[in-house]
Structure formats: C-alpha cells, structure tokens
C-alpha cells in the first residue's frame, strides 16, 4: 500500500477531522519529553474507540508502517517518539472515565484519562488512584501502564502494575483481547503483568480497570534538612531498616533546592545540602510514634532542622517544590537530561558521590531529585544544548551514570522505561541470552515489528539521531521504505 492510499484509508477509519498529515502539525509530535531524540511521523490519528484502533492497527500492518501509541507525550525515555515515517495513535479522544464501582474499589477508564483527573473525580467519595507520577497533572493512565510508572507515594502503595486489574489491548493482528480480570484473581498466565511496562511495543491498550485506594484518615508531612547529602541518604536507609515505611520519602540536593527556590518559594532552606520530604499517612494515633522514630533517626544523622507542615497550605507548598522541581531546572541551566537508575537504598550515598566524580570528568553538573525511599534515582545532567557537542557529552555522561547504578547492584530504570534513551545500556545490564529471550518474546507478540520499533532492545534498523546531529542510515532507510 502506498502512502497516499494509507492516509486515505486512515482518514476513512477515524474521520477527516481526526488525522494530521501537515508537516507543520506533525512537528509537534516528533518527540516526547526526552527532546534530544526526534523522529518525524507521517501521520497522527486520534481514534475514538477500540474499533477504530483495530482498523488503524490492521491498516498499518497491511502497509508495513510502524504504529506508535502516544498518551500525553511526557515520557522521559523517548518511548512516544515516533519511528520516522510511522503513524502515531494519540488518545486524547479516548479520555472517558467509563464506570466507577465504589463498592468494589474499581474504575474502568479509557487510556487517555489523565492520571490526576481520576483522583479528582473520586476524592470526594473517599478514594483516589494511588500511583502519582510527578507528571500526574498531564500524563495518562494508558501511558502509565505502558511504562509501569511510579510516583512519590509508590513507596508504600506500589507501582502502576499493582493498581491495574484488567486491560483491553489491540494486538498486531487487529484482535482486541481482555487481559487480567475485574476480580481479585485472574486464572491462567499473567498476561496483564506481562504487557504492563512493555512501552507500547506489544499492543495498544484501549481500556483499563484500575484499583481505587481509600483516602488515608490522616497525613503528616515533614521536612528534614541536612548540610550533607550523604547524611540524608543514610537517614533514608535507617528509617526503612527500622521498619517504618512512610507513604513517601523524597530527596532533593542543593542544586535542586537552589532551582526550586529561585522559581517558587517552597520553603526549603537555601543553605541546605539536601532536604528530605517525608510523608506519613494512616490513623493519626499510629503516626505519632512513627514521627518520633523518624525524627530521632534524622537527628542521629546530623539533621540541621526538622519541621512538620502545620497546615494544608504548608503541605501543598512543600509538595509543589518537589512536583515542579524538573521545570525549575530551567532557572539554573539552559537544558537538562533526566535519567532514572535505581540502586539499593544502602548505596545511595556512595552512588551520589560517584555521580559528582563523573560530572566533574565531563565538566558538567548533575542535580538529584528522587524517590529516595525505594532507591529510585533521578540524576539530571545540566548542559547547554546551544554549545556544539555538549548534547552528545551530556548523553555520554548520562550513560556513565547509568553504568554506575548497575555497578552498585541497581537497574537501568526505576520508572521512566528504557525507550530510546537506555537501549544501548541494556547490554550492560543483561547478557546476550537474556536479551535473546526478550527479542523472541517481542517477536512472538508482534511478529512484523509494527508496534513502536526502535525501542527497549538494542540493535535493529530504526535509529534516532540526537537533535542537531546528522541522520544515521537507519532513519533514512525507514523513511525511504515508507515513501515507496
Ligand atoms: C516533569 C515530569 C515528571 C515526571 N515524573 C515521573 C514520575 O514521578 N514517575 C514516573 O514513573 N514517570 C514520571 N515521568 C515520566 C512520564 O510522565 C511517565 O512515563 C508517564 O507514564 C507517561 O505517560 P504519558 O501519557 O505521557 O505517555 P507517553 O509519553 O505518551 O507514552 C509513554 C509510553 O507509553 C506508550 N503508550 C502510551 N499510551 C499507550 C497505549 N494506550 N497503549 C500502549 N502504549 C501506550 C507509548 O508508546 C510510550 O512508549 C515524568 C515526566 C515529566 C515530564
């Protein structure tokens, strides 16, 4: 099928108002939040329901053209950046909360529902959707499922996979199948778990049944400030080792504090080397002894000041600084590259020291703001993308940071996924036999490689050039194949 025929048939499937092919409009979709890699799609379609998604999948397969699912495009590993010449399916029209079953603590939603919108809907009835990525005001539940996203409160409540009970997905054949169940048990192989975190490379999700969590009776939010980041790290492991699992435990280093306080007044002391934002939730009576325990551990680790938020406004302000920290980096650097390796909690302090040494070798700065309780790091390499060669240097620096996480017994990704960003380092994490199994599994699910090619697994034909760099052969080949 040639390009003109494919576009005509896609238009027939979704309607003329719901397809973009104009190159200017398509530019808005050529990357996700990892803006250093680009890929220009040939069309963007906005399907309205599962049947339209099935038609789009069948057409792309027939034409031999990649299909890339996209939610809000907030992915930080390039997952939603299209293989050049591919068709992007965006779920802005599939944004309905279909059913809320308070009796069974479940909600049935379309993939384009914004994460925070579900909690906003259910909070007045005493429930919320627990996984809370910092991007929750924009990212979608379909994207969260594809990335198995985490968030500040996932320390206590678990990642996205712990909150998805069932899902409807459209396979490469065009068949729609239901994975998991609406009950607590799902017989047979756990295909639901298998598809969660597959980053849009296995199927397109068109409906999800998610768990709703009762709102806690009480919440206590504390800010512990330290002169040395190492002391804050040791506090984190000691708190968890003592058997206290807070709802959230977030660490911000001095560069992050500087950026946040420049942009908004969150109330973090500007002279601190690190702050820990610790939140407890549950019955107020059960939180008092835990707060005392945590306070004691902080003080033993040279905590310079410790306070608990005295009002909802103060709590909001403390959280605002954390949730908007990434945006604030714009105040201290022209560009940043956000990574997410995970290490055992006990290794946090030594790994952060290693990051400083790596940054010094590259003549760059690394800031850290992360989910400390589960060792899920977000090192941000600050750089100036206007300086020739500095983007490539930041990427190399980032690769070293990821390898340092692996050496410390950690993993390549805590929550942002592998995407384009970390696929090269998959060879540092996994041996050839393990990568071979992953390839065979992907080939079994999507034999023609229609869904989101060029992601997760190293090798393959599809390549994404660094922004500003000349295009390597793989991209040119993909574009040429499509224009036939
Ligand atoms: C400021 C900021 C803060 C962030 N904080 C966090 C955080 O705390 N925790 C965290 O985990 N992540 C975080 N992220 C990363 C990002 O928000 C998450 O990965 C999120 O889940 C992506 O959702 P999305 O709707 O934007 O998906 P997209 O970016 O559009 O897509 C992400 C992936 O999902 C696939 N996909 C999307 N929809 C579907 C579908 N319906 N079917 C199949 N595949 C699909 C895409 O192909 C892609 O591979 C942050 C990002 C930003 C910019």
Image (spheres, grey):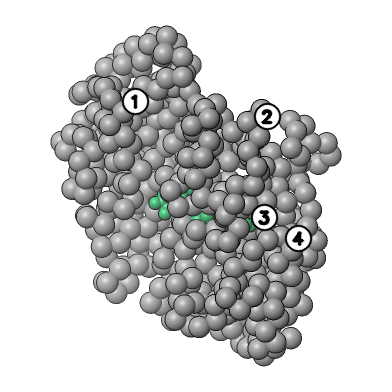
In terms of sequence position, does the residue under pointer 2 or pointer 1 come before the other? Answer: 2
Q: In the orientation shown, which residue stands out farthest toward the right?
A: 188
Answer yes or no: disc 2 within 8 Å of ligand 1. no
Number of the label disc, if any, that sits on residue 104: 2
Number of the label disc, if any, that sits on residue 205: 3
Task: Rate crowding at label 1 as few (under 14), some (14 to 19) or many (20 or more) other CA atoms within 10 Å.
Answer: many
Q: Is residue 44 above or below residue 399?
A: below
Q: Quadrant of residue 439?
A: bottom right
- Residue at the disc numbered 4: 171
In terms of sequence position, does the residue under pointer 2 or pointer 4 come before the other? Answer: 2
Q: CA distance from mark 2 to mark 3?
A: 23 Å
- Residue at the disc numbered 1: 221
Q: CA distance from mark 4 to mark 1?
A: 44 Å
Answer yes or no: disc 4 within 8 Å of ligand 1. no
Q: CA distance from mark 3 to mark 1?
A: 36 Å
Number of the label disc, if any, that sits on residue 363: none
In terms of sequence position, does the residue under pointer 3 or pointer 1 come before the other? Answer: 3
Left or right placement of residue 193 versus residue 358 in this view: right
Task: Rate crowding at label 3 as few (under 14), some (14 to 19) or many (20 or more) other CA atoms within 10 Å.
Answer: many
Q: Is residue 402 above or below residue 423?
A: above
Name the spot of residue 421 as percent of width and height, x first: 49, 60
């Amino acid at each position: 099928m040639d390009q003109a025929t494919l576009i005509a048939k896609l238009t027939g499937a979704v309607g003329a108002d719901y397809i973009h092919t104009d190159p200017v409009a398509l530019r808005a979709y050529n990357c996700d939040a990892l803006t250093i890699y680009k890929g220009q799609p040939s069309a963007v379609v906005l399907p309205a329901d599962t049947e339209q998604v099935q038609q789009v999948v069948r057409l792309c397969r027939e034409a031999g053209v990649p299909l890339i699912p996209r939610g809000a495009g907030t992915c930080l590993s390039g997952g939603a950046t299209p293989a050049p010449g591919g068709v992007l399916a965006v779920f802005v029209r599939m944004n309905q909360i279909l059913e809320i079953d308070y009796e069974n603590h479940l909600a049935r939603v379309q993939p384009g529902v914004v994460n925070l919108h579900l909690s906003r809907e259910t909070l007045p009835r005493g429930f919320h959707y627990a996984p809370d990525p910092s991007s929750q005001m924009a990212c979608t539940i379909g994207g969260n499922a594809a990335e198995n996203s985490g968030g500040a409160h996932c320390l206590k409540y678990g990642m996205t996979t712990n909150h998805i009970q069932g899902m409807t997905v459209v396979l490469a054949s065009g068949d729609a199948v239901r994975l998991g169940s609406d009950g607590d048990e799902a017989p047979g192989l756990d295909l639901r778990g298998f598809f969660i975190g597959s980053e849009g490379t296995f199927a397109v999700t068109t409906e999800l049944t998610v768990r709703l969590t009762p709102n806690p009776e009480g919440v206590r939010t504390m800010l512990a400030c330290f002169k040395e980041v190492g002391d804050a790290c040791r506090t984190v492991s000691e708190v968890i080792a003592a058997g206290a699992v807070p709802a959230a435990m977030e660490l911000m280093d001095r560069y992050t504090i500087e950026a946040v306080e420049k942009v908004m007044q969150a109330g973090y002391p500007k002279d601190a080397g690190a702050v820990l934002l610790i939140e407890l939730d549950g019955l107020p009576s059960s939180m008092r002894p835990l707060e005392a325990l945590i306070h004691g551990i902080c003080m033993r680790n040279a905590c310079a000041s410790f306070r608990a938020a005295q009002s909802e406004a103060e709590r909001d302000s403390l959280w605002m600084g954390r949730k908007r920290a990434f945006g604030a980096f714009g105040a201290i650097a022209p560009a940043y590259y956000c990574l997410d390796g995970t290490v055992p909690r006990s290794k946090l302090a030594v790994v952060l020291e290693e990051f400083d040494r790596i940054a010094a070798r590259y003549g760059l700065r690394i800031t850290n703001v992360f989910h400390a309780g589960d060792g899920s790091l977000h090192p941000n390499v600050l750089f100036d993308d206007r300086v020739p060669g500095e983007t490539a240097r930041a990427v190399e620096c980032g690769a070293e940071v990821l390898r340092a996480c692996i050496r410390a017994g950690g993993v390549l990704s805590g929550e942002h996924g592998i995407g384009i960003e970390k696929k090269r380092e998959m060879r540092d994490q996994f041996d050839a036999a393990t990568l071979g199994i992953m390839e065979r599994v992907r080939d079994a699910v999507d034999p023609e490689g229609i869904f989101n090619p060029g992601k997760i697994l190293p090798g393959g034909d599809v390549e994404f050039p660094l922004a500003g760099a000349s295009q390597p052969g793989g991209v040119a080949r993909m574009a040429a194949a499509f224009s036939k």
